[in-house]
Image: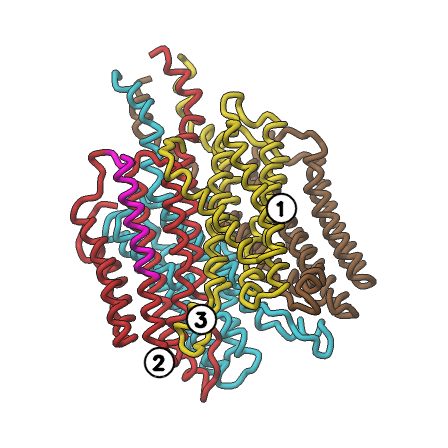
Chain colours: A red, B cyan, C brown, D yellow
Amino acid sequence: MRTAPVLWRRMPAIIAAHVSSKVRLEAFSDGIFAIAATLLVLDLAVPKPEPALLDGLLHEWPSYAAYATSFLTIGIIWVNHHTVLERMHRIDRGLLFVNLILLLFVALIPFPTKVLAHYLQSGGADAHTAAAAYGVAMLLMGISFSVLNYYALARGLFPEDRRLTFGRQVRFSIGLVMYAVGTAVSLIDARVALLIYAGLALFYVADPLLTAERGR
Amino acid sequence: MRTAPVLWRRMPAIIAAHVSSKVRLEAFSDGIFAIAATLLVLDLAVPKPEPALLDGLLHEWPSYAAYATSFLTIGIIWVNHHTVLERMHRIDRGLLFVNLILLLFVALIPFPTKVLAHYLQSGGADAHTAAAAYGVAMLLMGISFSVLNYYALARGLFPEDRRLTFGRQVRFSIGLVMYAVGTAVSLIDARVALLIYAGLALFYVADPLLTAERGR
Amino acid sequence: MRTAPVLWRRMPAIIAAHVSSKVRLEAFSDGIFAIAATLLVLDLAVPKPEPALLDGLLHEWPSYAAYATSFLTIGIIWVNHHTVLERMHRIDRGLLFVNLILLLFVALIPFPTKVLAHYLQSGGADAHTAAAAYGVAMLLMGISFSVLNYYALARGLFPEDRRLTFGRQVRFSIGLVMYAVGTAVSLIDARVALLIYAGLALFYVADPLLTAERGR
Amino acid sequence: MRTAPVLWRRMPAIIAAHVSSKVRLEAFSDGIFAIAATLLVLDLAVPKPEPALLDGLLHEWPSYAAYATSFLTIGIIWVNHHTVLERMHRIDRGLLFVNLILLLFVALIPFPTKVLAHYLQSGGADAHTAAAAYGVAMLLMGISFSVLNYYALARGLFPEDRRLTFGRQVRFSIGLVMYAVGTAVSLIDARVALLIYAGLALFYVADPLLTAERGR
């Protein structure tokens, strides 16, 4: 116990070093997630009064649907990112870069959202293309999230007893499959595809609220 | 006391785990609040020199009023969010999603602000619609904040002795009622409605400065 | 020493509570400062190739000067905000709102910057107005910073031995005076006013680098 | 050991003070990095359907290449900034300002990116100018990063045993040289220059993933 006073005195530095690396990764990631989600609102343009503002506002429904879907989707990935990062007991330099690829696709989301909202209003073949582009962007993000997860597993960044359960892994995979389905459906009907994307987001939001799951 | 040295050594990890989950929720939320508030400035366009720049600058007063009102409102919700989060001794997965719904409406605020600033200048029936849309957006945000509060109460996330006082609950409710009043008034006079929204924000800002309340 | 093991066990919660309130105020403020500074870049438009891109790029010099001046100014206020907050041993609810008023003017800076960059290129009387508007915006921000400082002094938020030195107070005041001078000068010559604003920012950046001051 | 209980009680305040200064510098910097990276997406405009949306989307490839290159580059500088800051055991007031200059150039990146994406599509001599401007912006950022590093060395902010290794210093320098090469090449061929910039970013991302380096 002779070492105790020394430990006390060095505790602040030890805590700072221990906390800082993961905290900074989380802070940077949280920043990207939060900014990408909030930038979505810039795509909502002031509607024209045709014939009155109320009509213009209501006519913009695809923009609101796309806004809400993308916002909730980014939020859900943030929660999952949070869950996965929290379970790691350490991170390495490679993880920073794998995480960077994921963030690249997260930060990209306002772009396909904007394209989808724009072309859903005009309809036609271009609406199909826009909905498919949205699905592909979501797939790329989902795949990078899986890569992050497998990288952490392969490098032993999770302690043995804190790995993701099989059930949670399956839940992540459902998302990937549904985005692939949505992308395929968008070639037939763009609005049904948007319904799939929105339904998926609502399912992920409602799921932990309906099940009385108490874990973080 | 034999366990003490072990506790010392594990302290950094314990602190990191304990702090991280709530801290990350707060960091993500703070990010959204801060970005939504700062994006408001993008709606202030370079005024035209008609007949001179000074006239153009002064003519934009509805934009400045809408900017200040929305900025202060977001800031006030941030302070309240801060107060509520601080009192929780733990959070759960459901709270992350309830919080996400609140953030969706917080991040939306630049949109009704932009619409209000634009149509207040042109006036007429569309100004009424714009002011009502602003009120509805604020109501939706206020309601999601109440839902967050009741969710936390229902799930026992507040320790018994740290629940919100009845006085504070009433103060939150005043906001909801005033936004409903503002929305109704906007159908008659858009500028009076903006005055109500602005007055509400100023009241919430001035209140803790006038009362010598010392709590955080 | 019987209470020691209890303290150990409760340490994480104590630290979290102690740290959280000031940390969250800082995090929210840092967010606003960082976003306001970074949004400035959005005002730099893709220049036209007239007659070639190089000419277009060089012709935009007022935008670059305004960008750099505003970026450094926001950065300097951030450093000062950092210094002042760091010295407080506690904060109160009123400070959150005084701080909010300061942030309102910080977040506003991209607007007068945009106006100045735009009208400096066109020149004439409107350039004078734009430079004066920029000075007024900076004055409002400087005054709110002083209010924050005096509020904290009046409420005893600084420990006796950590109050700002007289020298530092004087340095803050120089800024206010220079912005008033710049605003007055802008009515005569807009470019000289911009030179004053830029020189002030450079002075504040260079000062701690030239003097070998070792404090944080 | 009599002082132990006192230390326990004061521990939260000690930790808060110790952590806060560096943490706030990191938080502000992370904010700028994250926002600059995420703002890049605003430059991706909704493509025109000429002749169909798919053609418009594919025609925008220079925008996607510029987006990915700039995003990864900002991410890499963030990782390096992280590495350098982490090794410092203290910071001083001068570092805040040297860091501010670096952040000024980081926050600027969306501007040359936008110019490059725009003029790469039109081609010709202006594409050369745009690619050179991009290279110069990257060089300015790289040089400020080096200045930050040398400032910290000169002021003794790194503990003796945590200085950057010679190998890492060389790796940083490679970046500077390659940006100079890219800038020179851009006067001959803009697309080859973009390839060099993109290749450099990919090299820095892939390097720690290929080598099984375990450090953070």
- Distance, label 1 to label 2, CA atoms, is 46 Å
Span colored in magenta:
A137-159
Amino acid type of the residue tagged 3 in the rendering: Leu
Marks 2 and 3 share the same chain: yes
Farthest residue to the front: give it. D188
Circles 1 and 2: CB atoms closer than 8 Å: no
Q: For mark 1, what is the residue?
A: D140
Q: Chain of mark 2?
A: A
Q: Can residue C211 be seen in the rendering of this structure?
A: yes
Displayed quadrant of residue D6:
top left
Farthest residue to the top: give it. A2
Decide: few, some or many residues near mark 2? Use Cα within 10 Å; few <14, some 14-19, many ≥20: some
As rendered, which of A163 and D205 lies closer to the eye? D205
Kindly report which numbered mark, 2 or 3, lies closer to the viewer in this rendering. 2
Of the image marks 2 and 3, the number of the one nearer the N terminus:
3
Q: Residue D28 location in percent, x, y?
A: 52, 45
For residue A158, side relative to residue C140 (left or right): left
Amino acid type of the residue tagged 2 in the rendering: Gly
Q: For mark 2, what is the residue?
A: A123
Q: Chain of mark 1?
A: D
Q: Residue at x 32, y 60 (%)?
A: A138
Decide: few, some or many residues near mark 1? Use Cα within 10 Å; few <14, some 14-19, many ≥20: some
Q: Main secondary structure of the magenta part?
A: helix
Which quarter shows the C terminus of chain D? top left
Residue A159 lies, with reference to residue B126, above or below; the image says above
Amino acid type of the residue tagged 1 in the rendering: Leu
Q: For mark 3, what is the residue?
A: A44
- Distance, label 2 to label 3, CA atoms, is 18 Å
Q: Can residue C151 be seen in the rendering of this structure?
A: no
- Distance, label 1 to label 3, CA atoms, is 35 Å
As rendered, which of A58 and B67 lies closer to the eye? A58
Kindly report which numbered mark, 1 or 3, lies closer to the viewer in this rendering. 1
